[in-house]
Image (tube, rainbow, N blue to C red):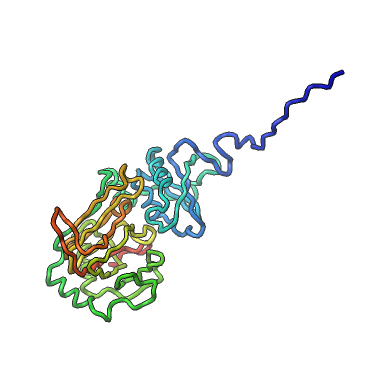
Amino acid sequence: PPPPPPQPHEHRSTTHPSQSQAGSARHPRQRVPTRALQLKIRRLDAHLFTDAALTGLAAPYGQVESVWASGSRAAVTFTTVSAAAALHAYLVGAKQCVGFGRARIFGSFADPGAAGAPRLTSAERIPSVTSDVAEAVRTAARTTPHLVGVTIVPGFITHDEETALLATVDRDDRWDTGPVSTQASRRTQHFGYAYDYRIQGASADSPVQEPPPQVASLVRRMRSEIAEADEGFDQITLQEYTAGQGIPPHIDTVWAFGPVLASISLLSDCVMRFRPVFGVLDDPAAVTDLLLPRRSLLLLSGSARYHFSHAILARKHDVVDGNVVPRGRRLSLTFRSMLGRPPPP
């Protein structure tokens, strides 16, 4: 008799039944956007996952219900799916995330109720993010998608106050000669805590000289006169810019410093350029140039603090409303608040 016909090859799937749906029980992945995002970062950069940093990253996109972090993993849950989708789109396109130095964060949608999803009910979970930081950023983002959160106060100090301040700080014996980590390509001075240029931040174990009385009085004045400046401002840096010298685009490190930054310009006018980061505007190439007059105060908060880089172009003059504004030697007094420490009395 003829041989029996060959039997079709039986394909044996190696996929476990529990993995045939959206993903494995261990790593559930949601192809469809949800209101929760699971975040991952290199273990080397795990220290960057702090409550304040995650809040600053997420809050501009919508109402944050909770944040959670453990080692190199974290989770953010919004009240709406659209907010989570907006943050996810930003993470997909951002090679370096705002305020996280050179670190990249990877995000994927997760079902908060699925097994193996971020455990948002753990003891480390923040039940509700209602801090002034989150509310300020949410308000700024909701008001307009363009640059908001910038306050410029012309003539914040008088000519006599500038002269007295310079007589105190602008001396050769005060400019930084310390370790390389506290020095930039320009001359600097640090008060309260040393700014470490290697990590683009400062830590509580790096205390340095207290600010001179003239500088300390400016902090008290800002806190008493300007609502947006109600900060501790315990890390202060004085930087010298010669004519033609600039600073590259950057966002002051989120994990190290608080939600409001302040700066006073001395000796010369200057134009500062603001550029939106990926995902904030439809046109990320859009820029805004703002003139910082001599003796003026600049405050950055909300969207301008977290989602716009700021820079000073390296050139010897600026063009403002068609007029050439020459630059001279300029000193910038920058005020930041260290995170994790209460404001001084």
> How many tags in the picture?
0
Report whether 161 appears left or right of 136: left
State left or right for residue 87 relative to residue 174: right
- For image coordinates 16% across by 71% down, the residue present is 162
Figure check: 3 above or below 51: above
Q: Quadrant of the C terminus?
A: bottom left
Image quarter hosting the N terminus: top right
User: Is residue 90 visible to the viewer in this orientation of the structure?
Assistant: yes
Residue 64 placement: quadrant: top left
Q: Position of residue 180 (x, y in %)?
A: 39, 74
- Give the farthest residue toward the bottom: 173
Residue at 29 percent across and 69 percent down: it is 237
Residue at 50% x, 46% y is 118
Q: Quadrant of residue 301?
A: bottom left
Q: In the rendering, at what x and y percent does residue 146 appear? A: 26, 46
Across and down, in percent, residue 215 comes to: 23, 71
Which image quadrant for residue 161?
A: bottom left
The reply to whether residue 295 is in sight is: no
